Image (spheres, rainbow, N blue to C red):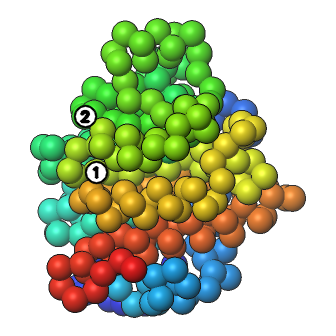
Amino acid sequence: MDAFCGWEESRITILQAPLDVTTSYVQGTNLGPKALIEASRQVEYYDEELKSETYRRGIATLPPLKFKGDDPEPAVQLIEKTTADLLAADKRVAMIGGEHTVTVGAVRAYRAAFHDLSVLHLDAHADLRELYEGSPLSHACVMARVREVCPYVSVGIRAWSQEEANTMEREGLSIFDIHTMRRDESWMDKAIERLGGTVYVTFDLDGLDPSIMPAVGTPEPGGMQWVETIRFLRRVFRERNVVGMDLVELCPRPGAEYGELTAARLFYRMIGYWTASENAGTGGSVG
Ligand SMILES: [Mn+2]
């Protein structure tokens, strides 16, 4: 995801947010953005599904954000401010994490700019704890913070606590857990139906099955497979107005390098769907 166009003509800005301060199991998500960008040089630039070269569609990459200390609050504020500035300059943001906490800053900025925003959340974990290890800005609390600003739909979920189960039931949240998805072939229709018209996509890579995504800090068995994932995303980008996205929790480590390539492939594919759908009214179209 090197720079192939200048800032002026770019529409999508890649924002690197290498934050890793609340990770609870394997650490190293601060190395995620760099690893993804390096792996992206191995990804075929021609997208065989979209039949075009995504990189030609106006993508600019900013230098990584710099975070100081181990308090997530100023980091989230920096992400919110940076995202708001980019939106004000009429750019759209594709962020690479970093731990999932980075999403809180981006969603706050997006919600301020798009009053009808809803969030699509792909993850193994519900991330609905009010506090985790004393912090409201832990990676395990991301969706509790998102829920405070806008509605959302979760997909791929397969691990949650008693507290989170209570919240889900009490609030009637739109959670598509992996068991429901395996039982109900129409889960994609239902999940998309629950989303509003304007969507921010946050993708925690541990939503994918560990067999195809080993490079995460908190893997959970029995996850989403590649083809169903991209099929679903393709529909979301076609059927909803996606205005922002992130890919988080890439945790590079020896033996899991394959996961970096998969993450780069997924990121490139998502940007491909996104730019193709934005072009839909001006000549280009998805498939
Ligand atoms: Mn997760």
* Residue to which mark 2 is pinned: 150
Task: Where is residue 29? Give x, y as percent.
Answer: 63, 50
* Residue to which mark 1 is pinned: 199
Mark 1, other Cα within 10 Å: few <14 / some 14–19 / many ≥20: many
Residue at left offset 55%, top offset 56%: 229
81 sits to left or right of 142:
left
Residue at left offset 32%, top offset 51%: 200
Task: Where is residue 129? Give x, y as percent.
Answer: 49, 19
Task: Where is residue 191? Give x, y as percent.
Answer: 39, 42
| Front residue of this view, candidates 219 and 131 | 219
**Residue 156 visible (yes or no):** yes
| Front residue of this view, candidates 191 and 118 | 191
Residue at left offset 30%, top offset 73%: 277
157 sits to left or right of 73:
right
| Front residue of this view, candidates 266 and 14 | 266
Residue type at numbered disc 2:
Cys
Image vertical order of residue 120 relative to residue 15, above or below? above
Q: Is mark 2 within 8 Å of ligand 1?
A: no
Q: Secondary structure at mark 2?
A: loop
